[in-house]
Image (spheres, helix red, strand yellow):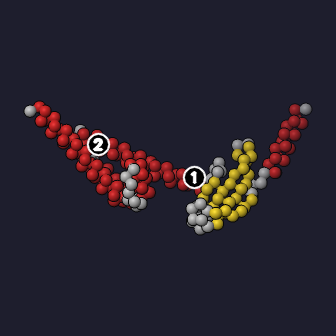
Amino acid sequence: MMNEQMITQHQYNAFVLAQVNTDGWQNEETCPDCGKMAIRRDFESCHTGSVNAHYTLNCSHCGYHECEQDECSICDVKYDYNQHINDEVGKWLSFMDLVEDRLAEGRCVPGVLWTEFKHVMYHQPAVADLFDNVLDLGLPANCGRQVVHHVQRHIMDVRFKLYLEQRIQLAKLN
C-alpha cells in the first residue's frame, strides 16, 4: 500500500510538471522607458517544488528589462553592478568621516586616499552621481568634478570651524 502511494505521488508530480508552460505567451506592451513596443513574456516555472507564474518585459530599442523571476541573469548582473557602486559610495562616505576626524585631531588628509577619491569621482560617473544623491547636493549628471570641489570646500569649512573654535577658546583664556 505504501508503495502504491509513492507511485501515485510520483505520477501526480510528473503530470503537474508536464502541465507547466515554461515557454509561456508573448505579447507587445509599451516600454516604460522609451515608449516604443517591448515584448512581454508570461510563463510558468518550477522553483523549490512549487509552480509560479512569472513575467519578463524586454525592450530591444533601449535595453529596458523588468522581471519578477526568482533567478534572472540580467537582474543579477545589474544588482552586482549596483552593489559595487553602493559599496564605493559607502567607502567614500566613510572617507568623509575620516577626514573630519583627522582634521579634528590636527592631522592632514591622507594624500593617497584623496587621490583615489578624485580618481573614482572623475572616472566612475555612476559613483559620483550616487554620492551626489546621498549627500543631496543637487548637482547635474556626470558631476565628478563638482563633487570633488564640494568635498574640498567641506574640508576648508571643517578647518575654518576648528581654527575658529581654537581662537575662541584662546580668547576666553585671555
Q: Residue at x 33, y 59 (%)?
A: 145
Q: Which residue is mark 1?
A: 76
In the picture, measured across the screen, residue 26 lies left or right of residue 62, that is right
Image location of residue 165, percent across then percent down:
19, 38
The C terminus sits in image quarter: top left
Residue located 70% across and 46% down the image: 47
Image quadrant where one finds the N terminus: top right
Give the residue type at disc 2: Glu
Question: Residue 94 location in percent, x, y?
Answer: 37, 44
Crowd class of label 2 (few under 14; some 14 to 19; many from 20; radius 10 Å): some
Task: Measuring from the top left, give residue 141's x and y in whole percent.
Answer: 42, 60
Q: Nearer the viewer, mark 2 or mark 1?
A: 2
Q: Residue at x 34, y 55 (%)?
A: 147
- Residue hosting label 2: 100
In the image, 27 versus 92, the foreground residue is: 27
Q: Secondary structure at mark 2?
A: helix
- Which of the 4 image quadrants contains residue 6? top right
Q: Helix, strand, or loop for circle 1?
A: helix
Amino acid type at image mark 1: Asp
Residue 129, image x, y percentages? 42, 56
Q: How many marks?
A: 2
